[in-house]
């Protein structure tokens, strides 16, 4: 027999397995030996009371043992001589698509414009320390995609898009802690995720797949309404009957390539704003009513949202105990993002705070057609860069000064390594964005007492929340409706947002490719 129950445990007891076992025995009135096994199913924090508690859902096994599940990697097969499928991009959509293809008996051939995950660190150091932006290797581009070095948060609401459990289990089987299977808001950390990404690559190679770095896709090989392959670095060709595009939300050149080759794209809404950084101790005090927080409580987070003049204003990619990092993908622009290490032990907390940008907001950029959203995004990023000294120093303002439309005489300390400089961010942002951000922040200050403080920095610009362009696909075949064999996937195609949703989309697309190709690997 299996009994499930939920426990409320104070932080000092939540990770004491002996105490948890004893609590379950007491609640179920069990005799010694009746509890044969105990599995934790779910763990979350409830901070609404005077003292935060963990809500821990457990499965108690009475007189039996849980059934053993085979490892997911045991279902993979050797595919070295199997039909090939090209994957463009080695982020979560691309790599999880590759694993799914191997399970299906197809050979993934992955091309990524950036470097492997370890070499990529040199590019991150260059942008952090010297303001040098490598357009092919940065916080957005390279093995593992944008999430690898910007936090590794695994939370998603996309429960209907696929198996979250399968994606998480694959991460665990490649080195992630098993805690991600039970935590309500699982997180790996930018110091741990690179090793996991490298392990996934080794799995792909072990089973006969290929992974190629420094391999920018510069053209598509098309014939009779079908994709036949890709051109790499303007010189090398690789042919295949199916190509998965998993290039991420910042590969602007891919959008232009598709457009120039007559492959239909669509503009889509996205969001744009700033990143707001507080002291983590303040967030702990607000959320937990204690600072310093007690042991076994993670750095506190928050999630805020409201409506202002018909547009959503919301926090995005909140990084407790985190750092603000430079995320530009080309010289001449300032883009910021957030990340956390696995321990989330930075003294700062930051969150993107953004305004929804709808298609009707892009009228001033109508001359750019379907790329109006991209043009708007670029204009804001380049405006911020022009205010600085040619490096990645970012324009910033105290939060209270931002709301009051006042230039800051000085700025609080920040985690942003390239450095900040005082600037009138309220004037540099588009008027509609600033107006809604200002009113949204005022509402957030009422909802979260202490949030609106002069000791918080507003740092511009948080602009890569999602892709401003969608690559359309048929909802049944997941293939581009006008290009047979082309399968758009992940954030860059407009069908995911975050590591896990992108991973699941990659898996879904891989299965669609399997249905498209018959056993001989020819289009069905």
Image (spheres, rainbow, N blue to C red):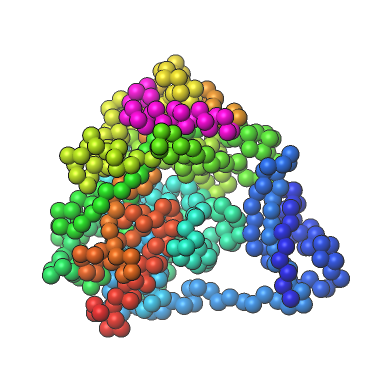
What quarter of the picture does the C terminus occupy? bottom left
Q: Nearer the viewer, residue 7 or 393?
A: 7
Q: Nearer the viewer, residue 131 or 503?
A: 503
- Residue positioned most to the front: 310
**Left or right of residue 238: residue 174:** right
Vertical side of 514 occupied by 141: above or below: above
Residue drawn where x is 24% and y is 69% of the image: 485
Residue drawn where x is 37% and y is 34% of the image: 461
Residue drawn where x is 37% and y is 38% of the image: 272
Give yes or no for residue 443 being in the magenta stretch.
Answer: yes
Vertical side of 274 occupied by 184: above or below: below
Residue 26 position within the rendered picture, expressed as x and y whole percent measured from the top left: 84, 62
What quarter of the picture does the N terminus occupy? bottom right
Q: How many marks?
A: 0
Magenta-drawn stretch, dominant element (helix, strand or loop): helix
Residue 183 position within the rendered picture, expressed as x and y whole percent measured from the top left: 60, 56
**Left or right of residue 334: residue 325:** right
Vertical side of 509 occupied by 157: above or below: above
Vertical side of 366 occupied by 57: above or below: below
Give yes or no for residue 440 being in the magenta stretch.
Answer: yes
Query: Could you say which quadrant of the image residue 366 lies in?
Result: top left
Residue drawn where x is 44% and y is 46% of the image: 150
Please state the extent of the stretch shown in magenta in the rendering: 423-448
């Amino acid at each position: 027999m299996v009994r499930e129950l939920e426990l409320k445990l104070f932080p000092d007891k939540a990770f004491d397995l002996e105490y948890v076992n004893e609590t379950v025995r007491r609640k179920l009135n069990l005799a010694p030996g009746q509890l044969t096994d105990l599995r934790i199913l779910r763990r979350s924090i409830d901070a609404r009371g005077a003292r935060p508690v963990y809500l821990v859902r457990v499965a108690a096994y009475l007189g039996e043992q849980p059934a053993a599940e085979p490892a997911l990697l045991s279902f993979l097969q050797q595919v070295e001589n199997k039909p090939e499928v090209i994957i463009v991009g080695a982020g979560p959509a691309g790599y999880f698509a590759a694993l799914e293809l191997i399970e299906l008996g197809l050979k993934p051939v992955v091309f990524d414009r950036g470097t492997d995950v370890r070499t990529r660190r040199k590019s991150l150091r260059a942008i952090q320390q010297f303001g040098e932006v490598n357009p092919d290797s940065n916080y957005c581009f390279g093995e593992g995609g944008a999430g690898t070095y910007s936090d590794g948060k695994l939370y998603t609401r996309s429960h209907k898009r696929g198996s979250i459990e399968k994606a998480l289990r694959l991460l665990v089987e490649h080195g992630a802690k098993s805690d991600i299977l039970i935590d309500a808001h699982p997180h790996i950390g930018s110091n741990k995720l690179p090793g996991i990404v490298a392990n996934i690559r080794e799995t792909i190679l072990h089973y006969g797949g290929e992974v190629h770095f420094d391999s920018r896709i510069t053209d598509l090989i098309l014939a009779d309404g079908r994709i036949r392959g890709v051109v790499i670095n303007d010189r090398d060709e690789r042919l295949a009957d199916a190509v998965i595009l998993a290039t991420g939300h910042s590969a602007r050149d891919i959008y232009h390539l598709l457009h120039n080759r007559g492959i239909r794209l669509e503009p889509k809404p996205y969001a744009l704003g700033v990143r707001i950084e507080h002291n983590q101790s303040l967030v702990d005090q607000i959320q937990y009513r204690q600072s310093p927080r007690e042991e076994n409580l993670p750095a506190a987070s928050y999630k805020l949202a409201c409506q202002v003049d018909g547009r959503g204003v919301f926090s995005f990619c909140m990084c407790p105990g985190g750092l603000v990092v430079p995320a530009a993908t080309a010289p001449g622009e300032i883009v910021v993002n957030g990340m956390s290490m696995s321990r989330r032990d930075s003294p700062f907390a930051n969150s993107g705070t953004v305004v929804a940008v709808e298609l009707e907001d892009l009228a001033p950029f109508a001359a750019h057609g379907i790329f109006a959203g991209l043009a708007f995004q670029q204009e804001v990023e380049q405006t911020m860069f022009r205010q600085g000294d040619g490096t990645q120093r970012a324009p910033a303002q105290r939060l209270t000064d931002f709301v009051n439309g006042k230039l800051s005489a000085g700025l609080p300390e920040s985690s942003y390594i390239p450095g900040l400089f005082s600037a009138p961010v309220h004037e540099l942002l588009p008027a509609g964005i600033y107006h809604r951000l200002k009113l949204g922040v005022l509402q957030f200050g009422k909802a979260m007492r202490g949030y609106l403080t002069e000791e918080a920095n507003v740092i511009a610009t948080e602009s890569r929340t999602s892709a401003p362009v969608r690559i359309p696909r048929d909802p049944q075949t997941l293939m581009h409706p006008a290009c047979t064999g082309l399968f758009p996937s992940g954030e860059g195609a407009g069908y995911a947002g975050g590591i896990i949703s992108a991973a699941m989309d990659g898996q879904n697309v891989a299965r669609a490719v399997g249905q498209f190709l018959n056993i001989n690997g020819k289009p069905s």
